Image: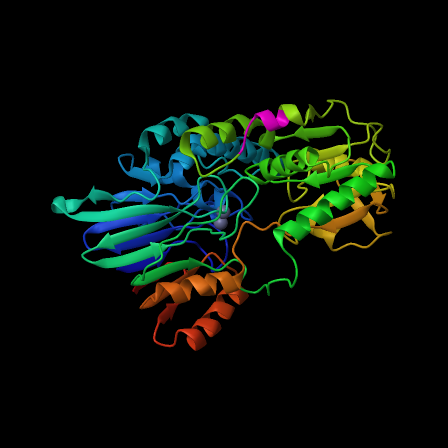
Amino acid sequence: MRLTDLNSAQDIGANCLLAEIGPFNFLIDCGMHPKKLGSAALPRLNNLPPLDYVILTHCHLDHVGALPVVLRKQPHVEVICSPGSALIAKRILRNSVSVMLKQREETNIKDFPLFTYSELDPIEKALRPIPLLSTRTLTGPGGAEIDITLFPAGHVAGAVGCLLEYKHRKIFFTGDVLFRNQETVPAAQFPSGSVDTLVMETTHGATPPLEDVTRESETERLLETINTTIAHGGSVLIPAFAFGRMHEIFTLLDNARRSKKLVKAPIYGSGLGIDLVDYFDQISRKAGFLNFRRQVMNDLEVKPLRQKFVEPGNDLPEKGIYVLSSGMLVENTPAWRVAANLLDHPRNAVCFVGYCDPDTPGGHLLASKRGDAFIFRGLDHVAHIKAQIERFHFSGHAPRNELMDFARQCEPRAIVLTHGDPPAREWFEEELAMELPSTKVTNPQPGQGYQV
Ligand SMILES: [Zn+2]
Ligand SMILES: [Zn+2]
């Protein structure tokens, strides 16, 4: 097999791997770089060979965001994905077009949007969902055959790892993976046997696992922060990613309320995550491997944000729990706008429940101390932070020791590292050299082909 990483840098960016296996050409994911703008956000798609299939591991934009560009170049290619991803891919891409159009206005980036709304219709026709944990044979050039099996990867709704078997050789792609249960997404169920080549994500390679921090202990701590803040007459802002994390939080709050661990307080929700409620409900009922019910929103009596905001700096008159996108408090999102009302007041709390890039407003706020100034550009407001700022660890990615356990169990002849920043990949290179000395480990340079 020959593998070429088409992401333009060694980072968590525009995930896209070209896998040439026998006569087959596969693209594994086709993402858009979350921190780049215009065509710089695309993977290297200029010299693609004719593809037989694209395999989509899940619908985060860093995996699916450039799919319409590939389909524009090669309109007949089939996109293999999970039934869950097939239900939501078009909706996620539609939102991406809206965001790119907005960014074009704000930054004058001429080559945004990278595709248009009308280019999304062919996506649905190209998607070929296959059931999880069931092997299918794909045919290719000259009647060649290859077996494919998709395995639940935890992480987010619809996420899968992918096993390809060609002439008794097994290649496994983890995609983004979490081996533990979340509120709505069950843990990954990966194959238990050995494989020849393992292509592995490395997101948390540079992050030592936190001692004594579990999903359960973080849930307890979050509920305690909410309950104390509300009891003291404050409001709680939970910035949450629209795709999955918001649904995790609503389900967590619903479970807590049922077991009488959550105080009575109004709950507000807004943003794309609310639009995705029906999709998540549908995925749970039709595709499985997800436990989210639309009913949660009714049971919690989630209210929409009112249209007219109070002046920045003035505290919100309606005290409550605000679960709003975006997770990184990006400018001009509901979470950012509500933060402009909460930060100046000591009774309030902001609870981050996901990763925040250090270059985003969420990252800046997490790096700030009480009393620091926090600028809301475009609102003509400088907040002086008095609210409590807390971070909770609910990552959707496996800690590095659990990825190492999986690598050991696979007994691979070769491992290829993907989806991680350079220090994360270096940690795995060093650790694997010690733990699996006979395994060939490749940390691919962008655009360079490797025989594995
Ligand atoms: Zn992901
Ligand atoms: Zn990813």
Q: Nearer the viewer, residue 74 or 133?
A: 133
Q: Is residue 190 above or below residue 98?
A: below
Q: Is residue 232 above or below residue 220?
A: above
> What colour scheme governs how the chains and residues are painted in the rendered image of this protein?
rainbow
Residue 338 in sight here: yes
Instruction: Name the residue at the front extreme.
Output: 259
The residue depicted at 77 percent of the width and 31 percent of the height is: 264
Q: Tell whether 187 sits left or right of 142.
A: right
x then y, percent, for residue 75: 29, 34
- Magenta segment boundaries in residue numbering: 292-297
Q: How many marks?
A: 0
Magenta stretch encompasses residue 293: yes
Q: Is residue 385 above or below residue 429?
A: above
x then y, percent, for residue 190: 39, 52
The residue depicted at 60 percent of the width and 40 percent of the height is: 241
Q: Nearer the viewer, residue 118 or 248?
A: 248
x then y, percent, for residue 325: 64, 36
Residue 49 in sight here: no
Quadrant holding the C terminus: bottom left
Quarter of the image for residue 7 reads: bottom left
x then y, percent, for residue 242: 58, 36
Quarter of the image for residue 19 reads: bottom left
Magenta stretch encompasses residue 285: no
Q: Tell whether 251 sits left or right of 374.
A: left
Quadrant holding the N terminus: bottom left
The residue depicted at 17 percent of the width and 47 percent of the height is: 145
Quarter of the image for residue 236 reads: top right
